[in-house]
C-alpha cells in the first residue's frame, strides 16, 4: 500500500516508452481511459539475448491465460516476472505486435505501430525490428485470434513484480482501425514502485 | 504417397532420432516432412536465405490465418508478414502452433530435471551452425505432428508415414528437430524424420 514510486510516466495513445527496472521492484501499467491495448516486452538487463517469452510462458502452464500469482518466463525458461495484481483479467498471449508490414498490407503507409514504438524507445540499446520478441498484449480481448471489444475500464491496471533486473518497453497500441482500441488510441500510465 | 511420379527428387535428408538437421530449399521447390515411424514430433524452422533476420514466424502466421491450426492451402508468413511457404498436402492435419521448442530450461523448470539433455532448441542451433544463428534467434517452432489441442499434450496420434508437404515461396534454410521430449520424459524412443526435397 505504501509503495515508494520510483518513476511515473504518462504515455500518450499511440506512443511507447522504455525503462530500466530492478529485481524486486514492481511495474504498474494502467489503462487510463479504458479499452486500450498495451503491448509489453522485457529483456534481461543489458543482455538482450534473454527476453520475456510468451510462448515459453504458455508452455510452462499449458495455457493461454495467466492469473494473479503466475510467473512470466524468459526464452531460457527462467521465471522473470510475477503477476501481483490484475483488475482486468483479460489479456492476449497469441498475437504479434502490430507492425508496418501489417499496415502496409492494408494499404496504410507510415502508420505508427507497436513495433516501431519499441524500436524507437529501445534505439539506445541498438534494437532493430527483426530482433523483437512477441509481446504480451495487456487488456487485449482476442480469443481464438479474433479481435473483440476490450474489457478494460478507465483505471484498470496490472501490477508485475520483477524477479530479475530488466529493461522493459511498453506501447499504447496505435491500432485505431476496425474499432480496435475503441477506435482511437488513448493514454496509459506506467509506474515503477518499490516496497 | 508423398512423392508423385512426376516430381523429381532433388535430395533427401534424414533427421536422426532426437537430433536436428537442415536443408536449403529454393523458391518453387517442395519440401515433404515425413514421420517415418509415427508418433514423432518434428519442430520446424525456416529462415529466408537472402536475409536470415527474416524467418518463419508462428505468431505472424496465426495473425494472418486467424487460426491456431493449419489447413491445406494455408500460406505461412515471416516476421515481416511475407509469404514464405504454402501447405500443399497434409496427411496428419494435427500440428501445434502454441508451444515453444523444448530447451534445457524447459526440462529444468517444468519437470525438475537436473541433468543436461538433448533438446529441440540446441538441435536447431546445431543444425544451423554453418549459418551463424545464435540460440536467442531460434524463436517459436511449427510443431509438426504434435497433438496438443487447447494446450493439452497427448502422444502418438500420427501414423507411420504421415507427412506434410510445403511449397516454398522464397529461398529458405529449413531446420528440423526430431523432438526428444517423449524419450526424456516418458522413455518412448525418438524416431527419425525424413526430409524430401522435390520439384515439379
Image (tube, coloured by chain):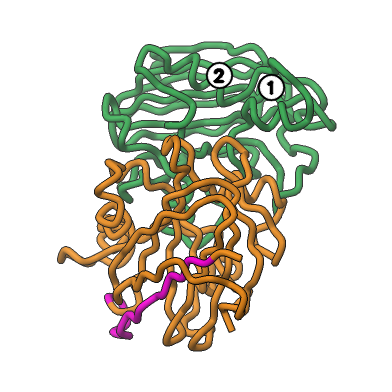
Chain colours: A green, B orange
- Of residues A13 and A119, the one drawn nearer to the viewer in this rendering: A119
The disc label shown at residue B168, or none: none
Q: Quadrant of the C terminus of chain A?
A: top left
What residue would you read off at disc 2?
A117
State whether discs 1 and 2 lie on one chain: yes
Residue A194 position (above or below residue B87): above
Query: Could you say which quadrant of the image residue A20 lies in?
Result: top left
* Side (left or right) of B137 relative to A85: left
User: Cβ–Cβ below 8 Å for labels 1 and 2?
Assistant: yes
* Side (left or right) of A75 relative to A176: left
Crowd around label 2: few <14 · some 14–19 · many ≥20 (10 Å): many
The residue that appears at 50% across and 14% down in the rendered structure is A120
The residue that appears at 51% across and 39% down in the rendered structure is A134
Using the image, name the chain to which the residue with label 2 belongs: A
What residue would you read off at disc 1?
A174
User: What span is colored magenta in the figure?
Assistant: B184-198
Q: Quick check: is B197 in the magenta stretch? A: yes
Crowd around label 1: few <14 · some 14–19 · many ≥20 (10 Å): many
Query: Could you say which quadrant of the image residue B3 lies in?
Result: bottom right
* Side (left or right) of B53 relative to B85: left
Amino acid at each position: 500500500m505504501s509503495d515508494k514510486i520510483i518513476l511515473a510516466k504518462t504515455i500518450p495513445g499511440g506512443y511507447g516508452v522504455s525503462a530500466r527496472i530492478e529485481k524486486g521492484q514492481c511495474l504498474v501499467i494502467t489503462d487510463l481511459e479504458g479499452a486500450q491495448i498495451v503491448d509489453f516486452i522485457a529483456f534481461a538487463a543489458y543482455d538482450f539475448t534473454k527476453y520475456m517469452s510468451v510462448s515459453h510462458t504458455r508452455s510452462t502452464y499449458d495455457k493461454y491465460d495467466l492469473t494473479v500469482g503466475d510467473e512470466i518466463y524468459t526464452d531460457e525458461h527462467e521465471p522473470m516476472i510475477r503477476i501481483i495484481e490484475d483488475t482486468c483479467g483479460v489479456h492476449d498471449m497469441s498475437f504479434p505486435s502490430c507492425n508496418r508490414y501489417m499496415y502496409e498490407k492494408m494499404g496504410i503507409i507510415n502508420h505508427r505501430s507497436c513495433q516501431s514504438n519499441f524500436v524507437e524507445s529501445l534505439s539506445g540499446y541498438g534494437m532493430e525490428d527483426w530482433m523483437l520478441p512477441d509481446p504480451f498484449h495487456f487488456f487485449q480481448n482476442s480469443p481464438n485470434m479474433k479481435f473483440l471489444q476490450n474489457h478494460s475500464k478507465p483505471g484498470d491496471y496490472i501490477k508485475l513484480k520483477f524477479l530479475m533486473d530488466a529493461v522493459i518497453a511498453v506501447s499504447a497500441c496505435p491500432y485505431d482501425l476496425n474499432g480496435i482500441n475503441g477506435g482511437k488510441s488513448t493514454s496509459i500510465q506506467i509506474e515503477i514502485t518499490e516496497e | 504417397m508423398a512423392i508423385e511420379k512426376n516430381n523429381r527428387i532433388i535430395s533427401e535428408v534424414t533427421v536422426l532420432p532426437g537430433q536436428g538437421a537442415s536443408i536449403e530449399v529454393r523458391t518453387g521447390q517442395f519440401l515433404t516432412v515425413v514421420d517415418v515411424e509415427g508418433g514423432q514430433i518434428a519442430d520446424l524452422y525456416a529462415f529466408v536465405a537472402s536475409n536470415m533476420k527474416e524467418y518463419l514466424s508462428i505468431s505472424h502466421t496465426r495473425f494472418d490465418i486467424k487460426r491456431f491450426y493449419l489447413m491445406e492451402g494455408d500460406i505461412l508468413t515471416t516476421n515481416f508478414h511475407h509469404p514464405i511457404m504454402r501447405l500443399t498436402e497434409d496427411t496428419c492435419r494435427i500440428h501445434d502452433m502454441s508451444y515453444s521448442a523444448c530447451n534445457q530450461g524447459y526440462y529444468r523448470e517444468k519437470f525438475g530435471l537436473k541433468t543436461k539433455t538433448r533438446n529441440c532448441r540446441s538441435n536447431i542451433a546445431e543444425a544451423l551452425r554453418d549459418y551463424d544463428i545464435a540460440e536467442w534467434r531460434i524463436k517459436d517452432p511449427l510443431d509438426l505432428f504434435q497433438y496438443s489441442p487447447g494446450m493439452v499434450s497427448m502422444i502418438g496420434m500420427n501414423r507411420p508415414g504421415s507427412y506434410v508437404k510445403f511449397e516454398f515461396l522464397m529461398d529458405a534454410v529449413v531446420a528440423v528437430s526430431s523432438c526428444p521430449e517423449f524419450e526424456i520424459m516418458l522413455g518412448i524412443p525418438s524416431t527419425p524424420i525424413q526430409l524430401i526435397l522435390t520439384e515439379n
